[in-house]
């Protein structure tokens, strides 16, 4: 219920001549009154003024009175009543940072991890991307850093079950092995010969070789011991690299690496939102990098309890066309590398590096 006090209103209007030219909102703000009282005050001010009423429409020219412009209201006074003042001091800024997990000194001491997704080496293919990669590793990583080959390094078409007889024509397992060995030779040829001067190099096996070879051994148990050492067949052993089993996690600095993530059935987690789907599959328990989809996708969630968790699919590292994916499939693939700088506790400065950038940086060394 409002309390109306005409004497008080008249006193206010007398004390504040600007009311006649002010809007209802301005009167409310400056005098800390409600809408109804602001209207009454304004009306009272108009009635007691000799001047014609100013326009109510903002920006409209004031009406002329006998050739003279309407007098503008006096300059605003600062009205600060004792109570109801809106301009009090702001509360102090809190220094709490519950989301902050990384100690700056630890971050500075943290390594870079370079994830190299599906390379799909074939026999007779241009191997220059392996040399660009070697030069990039040589120039941008230290022995303290890591390179993780994410699997499907070799395409292994000779073992593919999905090919028609005509497509299988002339394919040989021997040629797949040779492509893998040649690719590694091109890559390692750019690195220092002393292994202690190179970054740590890891390899997680993918479905294209590991899973297919294992399947052959399962189907033909008499082959056991003959084909089940792909590190040796594909040349990794020559460089002292022991591959990690297909779909077995490799952990470095709180990051999990594997070729792909099983979805709980026979399939793997993928799709347009693969990064988020992988985190969901892992119940947001850790950061994960996979390859396999040939697409780059990332999703990141931060909480006070855990800090950051990332789900990243790393794309693919080749430029050629794969027939099975057809025109739009090939066009949609993200061709490059993922670089995790200052990697610690599953967090990092995450960067995407296009294969074209490596070509621009290092192709000229081929010509030299
Ligand atoms: Fe692949
Ligand atoms: Fe794959």
Image (tube, helix red, strand yellow):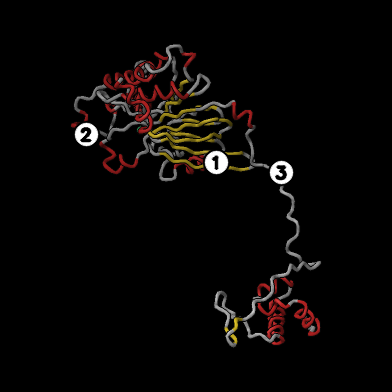
Q: Nearer the viewer, residue 47 or 87?
A: 47
Determine if residue 44 is in view.
yes
Mark 1 surroundings within 10 Å by alpha-carbon count, few (fewer than 14), some (14 through 19), many (20 or more): few
Identity of the residue drawn at 55% across and 77% down: 60
Mark 2, residue position = 164
- Residue 349 at what x, y percent from top left? 53, 35
What is the spatial separation of the Cα atoms under label 2 and label 1, in whole angstroms? Answer: 40 Å
Q: Which residue is mark 3?
A: 95
| Whether the residue under disc 1 has CB within 8 Å of ligand 2 | no
Q: Residues within 10 Å of mark 3 (few under 14, many from 20)?
A: few
Discs 2, 3 touching: Cβ within 8 Å = no
Label 3 secondary element = loop
**For this view, does 161 lie left or right of residue 210?**
left
Q: CA distance from mark 2 to mark 3?
A: 66 Å
Can the viewer see residue 218 in this picture?
A: no
Instruction: Specify the quadrant of the image occupied by residue 164.
Output: top left
> Residue shown at 49%/43% (left/top)?
276
Closer to the camera, 346 or 49?
49
**Which badge, 2 or 1, is on the more N-terminal residue?**
2
């Amino acid at each position: 219920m409002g309390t109306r006090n005409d004497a008080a209103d008249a006193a206010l209007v007398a004390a504040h001549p600007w009311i006649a030219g002010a809007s209802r909102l301005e009167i409310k703000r400056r005098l800390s009154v409600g809408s109804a009282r602001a209207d009454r005050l304004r009306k009272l001010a108009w009635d007691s003024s000799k001047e014609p009423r100013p326009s109510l429409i903002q920006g409209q020219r004031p009406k002329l009175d006998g050739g003279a412009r309407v007098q503008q209201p006096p300059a605003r006074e600062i009205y600060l009543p004792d109570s109801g003042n809106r301009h009090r001091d702001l509360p102090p800024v809190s220094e709490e940072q519950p989301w902050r997990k990384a100690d700056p000194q630890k971050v500075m001491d943290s390594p870079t991890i370079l994830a190299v997704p599906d390379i799909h080496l074939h026999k007779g293919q241009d191997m220059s991307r392996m040399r660009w990669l070697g030069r990039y590793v040589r120039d941008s990583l230290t022995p303290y850093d890591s390179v993780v080959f994410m699997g499907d390094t070799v395409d292994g078409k000779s073992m593919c079950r999905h090919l028609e007889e005509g497509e299988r024509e002339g394919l040989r397992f021997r040629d797949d092995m040779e492509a893998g060995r040649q690719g590694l030779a091109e890559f390692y040829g750019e690195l220092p010969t002393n292994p202690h001067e190179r970054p740590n190099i890891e390899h997680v096996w993918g479905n294209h070789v590991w899973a297919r070879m294992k399947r052959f051994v399962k189907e033909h148990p008499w082959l056991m011991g003959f084909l089940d050492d792909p590190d040796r067949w594909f040349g990794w052993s020559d460089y002292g690299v022991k591959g990690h089993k297909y779909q077995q996690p490799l952990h470095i600095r709180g990051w999990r690496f594997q070729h792909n993530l099983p979805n709980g059935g026979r399939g793997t987690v993928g799709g347009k939102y693969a990064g988020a789907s992988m985190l969901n599959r892992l119940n947001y328990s850790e950061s994960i990098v996979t390859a396999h989809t040939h697409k780059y996708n990332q999703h990141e969630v931060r909480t006070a309890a855990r800090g950051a968790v990332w789900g990243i699919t790393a794309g693919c590292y080749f430029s050629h066309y794969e027939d099975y994916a057809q025109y739009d499939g090939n066009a949609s693939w993200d061709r490059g590398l993922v670089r995790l700088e200052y990697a610690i506790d599953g967090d990092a400065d995450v960067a995407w590096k296009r294969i074209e950038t490596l070509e621009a940086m290092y192709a000229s060394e081929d010509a030299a």
